[in-house]
Image (cartoon, helix red, strand yellow):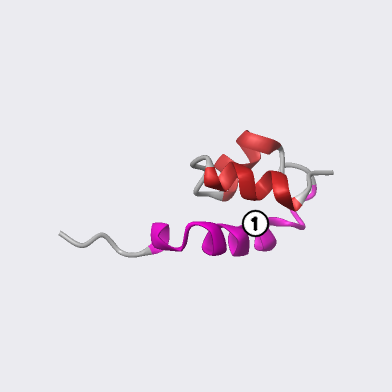
Amino acid sequence: MVRETEVRTAIRCGARTEESVGDACGAGTGCGSCLDRICELIEEEAPDTHLPYAA
């Protein structure tokens, strides 16, 4: 089991997708039931990463 604090730390260290979070701490790599929560945490910790690119 991966704790939410570990997921938040992975995001703060640069993980910006469910896959990169999984690579960093193992979250979401088992049954996948936490993937929605991982997305929510990415939005909370790094909300600007999902904005469309502006030239």
* In the displayed structure image, the side of residue 39 where residue 35 appears, left or right: right
Residue found at the far right of this picture: 1
**Secondary structure mostly taken by the magenta-highlighted segment of the chain:** helix
Measured from the top left, where is residue 17 in percent x and y? 52, 49
Q: Position of residue 45 (x, y in %)?
A: 54, 58
Question: Which residue is nearer to you in this view: 20 or 47?
Answer: 47
Where on the picture, by quarter, is residue 22? top right
Is residue 6 in sight in this rendering?
Answer: yes
Against 43, residue 29 (above or below) is: above
Task: Answer yes or no: is residue 28 visible.
Answer: no
Helix or strand or loop: what does disc 1 sit on? helix
Q: Residue furthest left?
A: 55
Residue located at (74% from left, 52% from top): 4
Q: Is residue 43 left or right of residue 4?
A: left
* Residue at point 78%, 48% (across, down): 3
Bounds of the magenta segment: 31-50
* Left or right side of 30 for 42: left
Q: Picture coordinates of residue 9 (x, y %)?
A: 62, 44
Judge whether residue 16 is colored magenta: no
Whether 2 is drawn above or below 54: the answer is above
Q: Quadrant of the N terminus?
A: top right
Q: Amino acid at mark 1?
A: Ile
**Side of 27 where 55 appears, left or right:** left
Label 1: how many Cα within 10 Å (few below 14, some 14–19, many 20+): many
Q: Is residue 35 magenta?
A: yes
Instruction: Kindly identify the residue that appears in the image at 49 percent across and 42 percent down.
Output: 14
Location of mark 1 (residue): 38
